Image: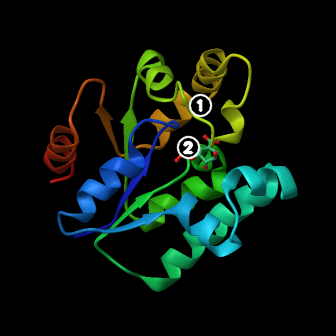
Amino acid sequence: MSNIILIGFMGCGKSSIGRFMARNGYRLVDTDSVIEKDAGRTIKEIFADEGEEYFRRKETDILMELIQREDDNLVVAVGGGLPMHARNRALIHKLGVVVYLRAKVDTLAWRLRNDTVRPLLQTGNPRQKIAELMEKRSSTYEGTADVIIDTDGCSYEKVYSMIKEKIN
Ligand code: S3P
């Protein structure tokens, strides 16, 4: 099986779908978790201590390392901001099939309503922030994806079966 790269906004279900796929023959790499583990700190702490650019460089480093390892059967759940950098877009395409898990702002805002761990959403009005970021990002997500899956209201099983259908 070739690798699958899951992209999409925070809260779109990349890590959850990744975990589901890991029970179905894939090996999961979650870039946020790898960065946190390597640093021994949370993403919130990394953003606060080193700044966002440092975090973005770490994301690129992981992609380069994965490409060098030449693994297959991976499902790679990447942070929501990773595809915003052209260098990362080139790398994820080298790594495998890029799947955008698309969700509506309302869905994202609901799923992220109690979030305390994502630094970009620790504002007075997270919903507005989600809408602003989606406005900036959605065309990049769409333009980067080999496959787009609309996930609103779908179970993990359903999303996975739609992914399988579209990549085969
Ligand atoms: C970010 C998304 C987060 C994490 C960081 C920044 C973003 O990952 O990488 O908080 O810029 O959208 P998830 O999409 O897995 O929440």
Residue 5 at x, y = what percent? Answer: 40, 56
The residue at the point 39 percent across, 31 percent down is 102
Residue 163 at x, y = what percent? Answer: 22, 46
59 to the left or right of 160:
right
Q: Quadrant of ligand 1?
A: top right
The figure's colour scheme reads rainbow
The answer to whether residue 56 is above or below residue 105 is below
Where is mark 2, residue-wise?
80
Task: Tally the numbered discs.
Answer: 2
Where is mark 1, residue-wise?
137
- Asked if disc 2 is less than 8 Å from ligand 1, the answer is yes
Where is the N terminus found, in terms of image quarters?
Answer: bottom left
Residue 164 at x, y = what percent? Answer: 16, 50
**Callout 1 amino acid:** Arg
Circle 2: element type: loop
Mark with earlier residue (2, 1): 2
Quarter of the figure with residue 101: top left
- Asked if disc 1 is less than 8 Å from ligand 1, the answer is yes
Proximity of marks 2 and 1: CB atoms separated by less than 8 Å: yes
The residue at the point 46 percent across, 25 percent down is 108
